[in-house]
Each structure stands twice: as C-alpha cells, then as structure tokens.
Amino acid sequence: MSHVLAVLEQRDGTLRKVSHEVVTGARRLADALGGEVHALVCTAGPVAGVDAASRFGADKVTTVTNDAFGPYAPEGYARVAAERAKGGGYGAVVFAASAQGKDLAPRVAAKLGVPLAGDITDLSVDGGAVVVTRPVYAGKALLKVKVTATPAVVSLRPNVFTPVERPKSGAAETVAASGDGGRVVVKGIKAAAAGTIDVAEAPIVVSGGRGLKEPGNFRLLEELAQAFGGRAAVGASRAVVDEGWRPHGDQVGQTGKTVSPSLYIAVGISGAVQHLAGMRTAKVIVAINKDKDAPIFKVADYGVVGDLFEIVPVLTSEVRRLTSA
Amino acid sequence: MKIAVCIKRVADSETRVKIAADGTSLDEAGVKFILNPYDEFAVEEALRRKEQAGTGEVVVLACGSGATQETIRTALAMGADRGVLLESAALPADGLAVARALAAELKDSGYDLILFGKMAIDDYNHQVGPMTAELLGLPCVTCVAHLDLADGKGTAEREVEGGMEEVEFPLPAVLTVDKGLNEPRYPALKGIMAAKKKPLDVKPAALGTPGLQVLAMTPPPERKEGRIVGEGAAAIPELLKLLREEAKVL
C-alpha cells in the first residue's frame, strides 16, 4: 500500500481546472495501489476552489503558504513538492503537463533522483508498478512504459483525464513554508486579451489555416469561437503562424501546442503531418475544406466540403442559436 | 560568453513511423534524421549572444549514437566552435539518465549559459534541460520565447496558458528555448566546409541505470473512418445534428 501525492496549481489564488484532472489521475493510481490521495498546492494565501480536490478524491488537502508563492516560484515550489514527496513515502507523484507542470515536474523528479514519465495519456498499475502510455513521434506511435523507480513521477496531458467525482473527506490543513521563492522569480503574467481561453485547455478549438486567405479573415473563426459561449479558443496551423497572421501561442501542431479538446474544428487546414501531431487526440474532429482530397478529411470524423467563407458564417449563426436556446 | 548548447539527433517529423522487430523502438531503416528543430533556436541564440559579446565560445554537446556526430557537425556548420559527443548506442526513455550524462560533462566547466531546445520532437520529453539544471544546481527557465541579458542577470518571457510569464534570473543559468526566440540561420557552404575541421570529442556517456522500461511501442489507435457530411452551408444542420446526437459533444 502506498499513497499518491497530487500536485495542484493555482493562479491568482484560484485552483486551476487542470488540477481536477490531476486529482482524478492520482485517485486512479491510489485505488490501484491501495493508498490515499494527498493533494498539495503552493500559494501565498487562501486558494479559492481548493475544496474541489476532495470532490474528485483527495483524502487530504495541504495548502503550503509562503509570501513568495503567489505567482509560480519554480525553485520554491520544487523544494516543497520534493520535501513532501520524500517525507510521505509516496508510491507516485502526479502533476499536470501544463505550462507550470512541464517546468516543475522535471525539477522535482531530479531532486528525488527518479525519472519523469511526462505528458502521459493513460496510466495503470501492474504488479505494483506504475505503467503509463505516452505518445511519441508526433503521435504516430504510443510508448507503453513501466516506471521501475519509486516514487513514480508522472505528468498528465491536459484534457485527457476527464475529472470523475469521487467524494472523500479531504481533510484540509495549511502549513507555512520557510525559505524564499528561489533564484528564478516570476514577475507576473502579461495576459492575452481578456476573456480568451488557451487553445491547450479549451474544450472546443476552432483552428484556421491558409484557406482563410488573409489574417483579417480570422475574424470569422473568432466569431464562431464566441458563439460557443466562452468554451472555445481559436487555433492556427504552422503555415499561418509562420506568415505572422497569428501568434505562436495559437499554433497547434508538432512545433506548437498539442491539444485534446472534445471538439476540434479545422477550417481551411489541409492537414499536414505536423498539424495532425497536435490535434489527432481530439475526441471529435470536424473539417471544413474546399478540397475534398485534403488529408484532413482522413482524420476528421465529420467533413464538410466547400467554401469556408460561405459555410462558417452559417455554422456560427446556427451554433449561436443552439447555445442561446 | 562561454555557452554550451545541448542538442539531439531526432527522426524528421515527416518520417513514416515503422516499429522495429523488437516491438519497443523505431525501425530506423530509411528514416531521415535531423537536428531537433527546437535545438536550432538554441544554437542560433548561442551564436548571437557570442557575436554580440564579441568574444566567447559556443560548445555543442549531444548524447547519442556515433551517427550523432553528423548532427553536431550541422551545429558546427551554423557557427559553433567545437563539439562533444557523449556516445551511447541507444538513448534511454529516461530523461534523467541523459541529464546525468550531460551534467557530468558540464560540471565545473564555467559556462555562462547552457541552452537546450524546450523539447525533442521525437519523445516529447520536455525534461532534460530542467533536470540538468537541477543536477548542476543552476537556475533554470524553460520555454523561453524572449530573452534579455545584461550585467549577469536575465529577463525572459515564457508562454503559459493565456499569456506570457515574465521571469527574472541570475547567470549562470540553464535555459530551454521555444520557437519565436529567433530565426535560425542556414549553414553556409563556407560554414559546412569549416565545420569539417572543427574539434569534435567523442567519449562514452555516463548514463547510469535508467528507471523507465519501455514495454511496447504500438501504432496509435486508428481513428474511426470519418465521413463527408455534405457540401457547402447546406450541410450545417446535419453536421450539428450529428455533433449533438451521435458524437454528443454539443
């Protein structure tokens, strides 16, 4: 029997939703290992929504406070997580493979002297050992990997581990961490336009490619995204990012973001290997393209062939009608 | 400025993935190997920093098979001064093992900056840079998309969900770099010729015992055959019906 440490994230004092997925993944491991889930969050003050951790299966929730822990403090957070992981005799430590988790998990694993199985899409326990699945070669192959070190440190690809409610007592405690935030200091986050959500985390992604013809036409996709009522983000293919039509942060693909939304709508995107690498794990893919032979239709669940400038506005108004109904 | 750049030889993203007979690795026959694209940004950044400083050295390090010498030569052709190959017949899935080998080589070598690409496009590990920093006890910033260095200090911007995080750090430091930091140069013919004569040390990699064991490599599950719902805007009502009633995503 061994417990599982779930490392959660807050931003501006609010628990991030990706942490619900982390607790769910940790719960799955803990059930298989016959242990408890202990959740950990680093912060400067109270964390709104941290009680959700018990709803998704945390037996204990520890809030670790330090004046330097308001924004992400890479070295401070790593020190706290590694000390906890060492002290608790954990069988596994679970992170999100978010921007913060991708930075933090390797530091913690190195401090513990154990490997990191990062950005995983599935996990199980076999004969007491944690076994994970992770996509490699741009999603063209899956690697099944057994973690032979303890604790097994893993990070979960966002949007893959659907949160499952598993109410537990979630005994809450708050402890103060000594020391400072470390040598690397986050001064703040220059936020993207208000009300936008990141393509890596959005449940719905509407992406555009060269078929949009010019940057101004992305307005059509922004309107479609808005029609989904705050649940959608606008993504882009590498071609249009390289042209400077859209910021790199919007790029979906091998040299951009890997997204796993419930619904991915590819508009005017032919479907190069490099793009498919970033979105092939979406639950449902819709493609709108004028070329019926475009490779995107090979991976799309539903395709519409035709002129996107005619199709997208109709789709937007129909979606708007649905979501406002 | 003395700068180290840690690079990796990877299979080109356009490559067709065929699984080897052992069922746990890539069949390399006919596969084109390239310098990891994110590492190109790291090499370019190192060269620019050295050029700005007017003095210094750019050393390229890689862990990998003998064929990785070719990849190191590509970075030397871009302008790096010398290369070191930590040779190992195969690279383990465990990034910490690679970080250990790199850290053993980088330790006490007096680098002002140690650069990595933010990830390799073959294993998507995202970890060797920050692990190496941890083993060396150096500050580290990952996924750097904008960088200012002055007076022994640095300011970086890194992309996070919904914005850019602004980060300050002291030098020496380990940075992993993202696309957008710069536009890598192409090696000129003169550079390619010069690269052949630049020093390249080869020594065995001190990988230790990896803590990850690859059980299997498999093709991803086939996506269920999709269908064309229709042509033009007339197909939209049917599309939405399918998304609601069949796919149940709306």
Image (cartoon, rainbow, N blue to C red):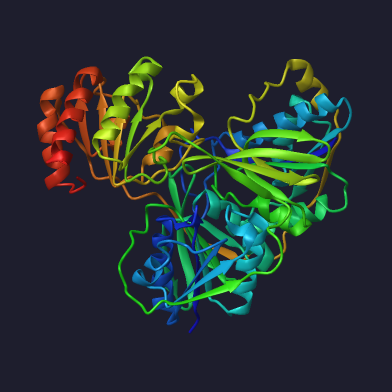
Q: Name the residue rendered at 63%, 67% in the picture.
A: A80
> In the rendered image, which quarter is residue A169 located in?
bottom left
> In the rendered image, which quarter is residue A150 located in?
bottom right
Can residue B94 be seen in the rendering of this structure?
no
Q: Where residue B180 sits: x, y (%)?
A: 59, 30
**For this view, does B56 lie left or right of residue A298?**
right
Would you place residue A250 above or below residue A243 in this image?
below
Q: Where residue B14 sits: x, y (%)?
A: 48, 32
Would you place residue B53 above or below residue B246 in this image?
above
**For this view, does A322 lie left or right of residue B104?**
left
- Pick the front one: A192 or A209: A192
In which quadrant will I find the N terminus of chain B?
top right
Q: Residue furthest bottom?
A: A1
**For this view, does A165 lie left or right of residue B24?**
left
Q: How many discs mark residues in the rendered view?
A: 0
> In the rendered image, which quarter is residue A236 located in?
top left
- Pick the front one: A129 or A307: A307
Would you place residue A291 above or below residue B134 in this image?
above
- Pick the front one: B148 or A262: B148
Q: Where residue B40 sits: x, y (%)?
A: 66, 32
Q: Where residue B222 sits: x, y (%)?
A: 31, 46
Q: Name the residue rendered at 24%, 18% in the picture.
A: A309
In which quadrant will I find the C terminus of chain B?
top left
Can residue B149 be seen in the rendering of this structure?
yes
Q: Name the residue rendered at 45%, 81% in the picture.
A: A35
